[in-house]
Image (spheres, rainbow, N blue to C red):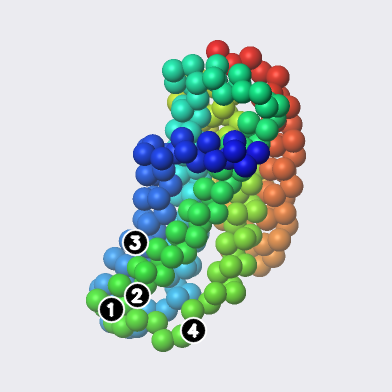
Amino acid sequence: MITLIRNELQKLKGSLALLVAVAAPALPGLLVMLGLVSKDSPANWSDSYKLALPLWALFLGPMVIAAFTALTGQIEHRGRGWDHILALPVPRWRIFVAKIVVTYGALVVMTALVIAGAGLGTLAGGAMGGGVPVETFPWEKLLKTSLLVMAAMTTLVAIQIWVSLRFVSFVVPLVTGIGGALVGLSVLITGTQKAEWFPWVLPFNAIVSPDPYPFAMTGLFCGLAIIGIMVPHLSRHQFR
């Protein structure tokens, strides 16, 4: 399994998927910095992360995950890559589990980059504006929130992985991700509670809800259930 994971990581080197995973999480931090430059009052960590984390959870994160999974799926779909990888003398299910592990690992890294980028954006924007934050950096709160968001994202990540590996077309996983993100935005704009359990809305609710745990646990366990169905299905599928 370690060898398969290492091979998956090797495929990402120099790929557009890696560029997306590294560059996109910097955008919330950039927006935080731009918002602080014109302020006269000192920056504070709470306001910065109230902007950065919901933006990541509701829109930017799902869009980046859609692009990342679509691009990594195309690595195998192009040039009959499945013919080679499925001919390896290992059980098929291990190949797909390795891909899932790498994708979720990328989610962890991207979330950490969002936290770091927003922190740097706060310091830079505060230095150019009304001053840097004077309060203690909220490590524990950010760690807790990040874990809840990543747990809530499990379902949408599992769906994106499945779609990107199952369908040859690059468009299908991209449309899935865009559609899900747009539903999430419509929920935010209209304020409706009828779609609060929609997979693309769960991460946002895990941040803003007074009780985030039901949303995080729903995303986590539904995602694990989807993975439990996805791996056997893909293992039996005949890729062309």
Is residue 235 visible in the rendered image? The answer is yes
> Residue 11, image x and y in percent?
46, 35
> Which residue carries the number 1 mark?
127
Could you tell whether 232 is left or right of 126 in the image? right
Q: In the rendered structure, which disc, 4 or 2, sits on the residue that comes first in sequence?
A: 2
- Name the mark on residue 123: 2
Question: Who comes first in sequence, dot 4 or dot 3?
Answer: 3
Q: Position of residue 159 (x, y in %)?
A: 61, 36
CB atoms of marks 4 and 2 within 8 Å: no
The mark lying in front, picked from 3 and 2, is 2
> Percent position (x, y) of residue 198?
63, 44
Q: Residues within 10 Å of mark 3 (few under 14, many from 20)?
A: some
Q: Establish if 95 lies above or below 124.
A: above
Between the residue at mark 3 and the residue at mark 2, the CA separation in whole angstroms equals 13 Å
**Going from the N terminus, do you reach mark 3 or mark 2 first?**
3
Q: How crowded is mark 2: few (under 14 residues within 10 Å), some or many (20 or more)?
A: many
Task: Give percent across and percent down for residue 133.
Answer: 39, 82
Regarding mark 3 in the picture, which secondary structure is present there?
helix
> Residue at point 59% right, 38% down?
3
Q: Label 3 sits on what residue type? A: Leu
Please name the residue that numbered disc 3 is placed on: 31
Q: Measured along the vertical axis of the image, is residue 124 above or below residue 193?
A: below
Q: How far apart are marks 4 and 3 (CA)?
A: 22 Å
Q: Mark 4 points at which residue?
A: 136
Labels 4 & 1 near each other (Cβ < 8 A): no
Query: Secondary structure beneath disc 1?
Result: helix
